[in-house]
Image (cartoon, rainbow, N blue to C red):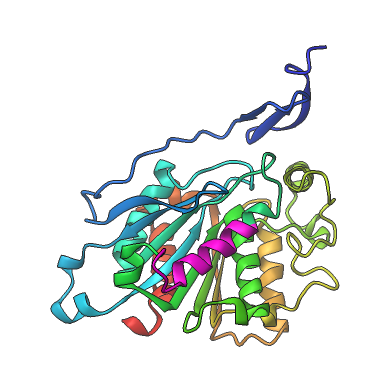
Amino acid sequence: MDPDAEVAFEFVPVIRQYKSGRVERLLPVHPVPPSVDAATGVASKDVTIDAATGLWARLYLPDLSARGEGAQRRRLPIVLYFHGGGLVSGTAADAPEHAFLNRLAARAGALAVSVEYRLAPEHPVPACYDDAWATLLWATSSGSATDPWLRDHGDAACVSVLGFSAGGNVAHNLTLRAGTEPAAVPRGARVEGMALVHPYFLSPACDTATGKDWVRRKLAELWAFACGGATSGSGDPRVDPVAEGAPSLGRLGCGRVLVCLAEDALVADGAAYYDALLASGWAAADAELLDSRPADHEFHLREPDSAKALLLMDRLVALITGGYQ
């Protein structure tokens, strides 16, 4: 049989790889260019972070002229954002993600950095985590390589890390590394908050809790696929942060956490993560849970004006702004 036609791995509707190595990404993606958003006044542009790896990001700067004179002089909180897509698909340029970042930057008055991290299988895990770490160091550096928007307007002492779905997995692993390697973070930089929106975690202990057995099996296979077959996922703290022997969530390098749940195959894992936060010593005042059920996995992108999406936006803004408002 032709190896370019024989399937080696398939998870419909996400990805298909053939024995030849050819990859088909099945999730629809509708990339849009950076622009000045007419609805919010937010300006965006694409910047290269590491030409050697191809790492880039889309930056979002809110309309400074719309702020009061005092607010114009005040530095903006920085948001690092990681898109969804199972670690194998998606892009920072996708239209729904782009629109979400325009709304978020405008509402929070924040300078957002939407990261185009490398995808598996061409770049297996941990490439996505390496890219996230490189972006954090780049965005909080005071060196000449930093983008002028960040240099002139960003507040490296008030960084929030936000991830949706697989991006939530990346956000968790980044924030944990920031907590376990604080000396590697530029002086004066600090991750103040982390928000995990319907995060991609898989704990075997949650397998019977959702009634979505087939989807969970495929998600476990997808994780192994994203890792180049190097792990089964069971007990791997990168995808199962509540596994026995996983680093304590008390070591997360941030001051506040927001965990958001939706009606999906990952909801029990997100709830278990939140319970583990409290068990590790996090105070309920600093670790918030937002349960949006029965709204589903992508409701905030698909229905941004719905009551639940607006509530989610309110919670994200409160996390990002902290003492700014």
* Quarter holding residue 325: bottom left
Q: Which residue is drawn at the image coordinates 71% and 29% (left, top)?
A: 17
Q: Is residue 74 above or below residue 48?
A: below
User: Residue 154's spot in the image, x, y percent?
Assistant: 35, 72
User: Residue 170's spot in the image, x, y percent?
Assistant: 62, 60
Q: How many marks?
A: 0
- Of residues 236 and 305, which is closer to you in this image? 236
Part of the protein shown in magenta: 129-145
Left or right relative to 27: residue 74: left
Q: Which residue is drawn at the image coordinates 79% and 46% (left, top)?
A: 224
Q: Is residue 116 magenta?
A: no
User: Residue 105's spot in the image, x, y percent?
Assistant: 34, 62
Q: Is residue 137 magenta?
A: yes
Left or right relative to 147: residue 261: right
The answer to whether residue 160 shows anywhere in this view is yes
Q: Which residue is drawn at the image coordinates 67% and 55% (left, top)?
A: 266
The answer to whether residue 261 shows anywhere in this view is no
Q: Which residue is drawn at the image coordinates 34% and 40% (left, top)?
A: 33
User: Residue 117's spot in the image, x, y percent?
Assistant: 56, 51
- Of residues 315 and 21, which is closer to you in this image? 21
Residue that protrudes farthest toward the front in the picture: 144
Q: Decide whether the magenta segment is chiefly helix, strand or loop.
A: helix
- Of residues 95 and 306, which is closer to you in this image? 95
